[in-house]
Amino acid sequence: MKLKEIYSVNTAKPVISYEVFPPKNDADGQKLEQLFLELEKLMKYQPSLISVTYGAGGSNQSESVEIIKRIKTDLKTTPMPHFTCVSTSEKNIKNYLKILEQLSIENILALRGDIPGTQEVCHDFKYASELVEYIKKQSSLSVAVAGYPEVHKEAVSPEMDIEYLKNKVDKGADVIYTQLFFNNAHYFNFCEKCQSKGINIPIIPGILPVTNFKTLEKMTSLSNVDIPQDLLTKLNKHKDDKDYIKQTGIEFAIKQCKELIESGVRGMHFYTLNKEYATGKILGNLL
Ligand code: FAD
């Protein structure tokens, strides 16, 4: 099913989607099998879509394809591969689009990608908007893009960040998935600003349940995410107590999601980190 249809289905419940990544250092395929065991447990919450990240450098293109195929065949769910402009070429993107069409994939998340020190963004595509435009011309895929409630770290200003987001929408994006955030006020404010600029496609909040203090530190240092002081104080006090961190992270995410649902969000996109536990506990409480 295409993104437009997924998010136009009229139900009282928000559309649930998950993000997973191709496991690293998985020569014997054990981690991939584990990932599918975790996903199978999450099927009971009836996700409409599972997205698969794409590593910088294209190193995991074949792993991504393998996962996409299995989401479709084994889980009977709609997959959405991510794709980035980093260290690739127009030829490579064209070939990849052909592979996706042969697999009857209907959706893609088009990104610029993060630029590691040693790599360059593809000369053919500098920004995600150019990739969106190219994909729309070359294929019938429905395209999603990324949005940043707390402003992208390289943006010249919050206003320009939204202008460039609008550009991605004007080039043909159907849905926006947001960067993770913990303070819903940033999301509500972002949605308002987008609407005032004429962005009228669904803006789906990205939810990351905190399960590990180090992962939280790493992810937030990469993206300048505001962590509410009361949550940070609690987590900091018990940062070595793994069970406490998990429990507190899950309780926080349940409250956060309840508020988002009350506000009428069309969907919620869970950054599962390839594990069922936290996302399952949250959805078990909500649905
Ligand atoms: P763009 O939309 O191109 O924006 C990048 C920056 O350039 C912004 O600061 C923007 O304001 C600015 N900009 C845009 N257009 C112009 C212009 N014409 N002139 C000047 N400035 C401009 N990364 C991966 O490597 N793999 C993944 O699978 C992946 N999945 C993600 C999924 C989600 C939901 C999100 C939110 C992020 C994901 N990322 C992923 C991270 C993403 O690649 C980075 O945040 C990257 O730095 C920006 O990508 P973008 O598509 O938002 O870029």
Image (cartoon, rainbow, N blue to C red):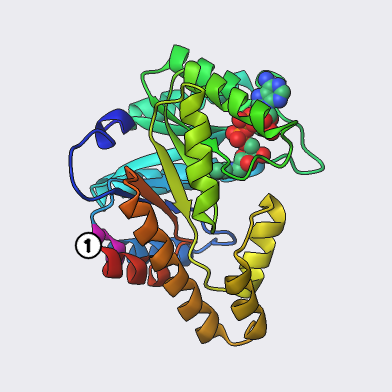
Residue 143, quarter of the rendered image: top left
Side of 123 relative to 24 (left or right):
right
Find residue 185 and report its horizontal and vertical position in percent.
Answer: 52, 51
Side of 195 relative to 73 (left or right):
right
Residue 33 drawn in magenta: no
Q: Specify the segment rendered in magenta.
A: 41-45
Find residue 278 and report its horizontal and vertical position in percent.
Answer: 41, 70
Residue 284 visible in the shown view: yes
Residue behind mark 1:
44
Above or below for 90 versus 52: above
At x 41%, y 17%, the residue is 139
Residue 54 visible in the shown view: no
Q: Nearer the viewer, residue 147 or 198?
A: 198
Residue placed farthest to the right in the image? 117
On-image quarter of the C terminus: bottom left
- Residue type, mark 1 in image: Lys
At x 23%, y 54%, the residue is 46
Q: Which SS does the magenta portion mostly show?
A: helix
Find residue 151 and report its horizontal and vertical position in percent.
Answer: 64, 40
Above or below for 157 versus 45: above
At x 29%, y 44%, the residue is 72
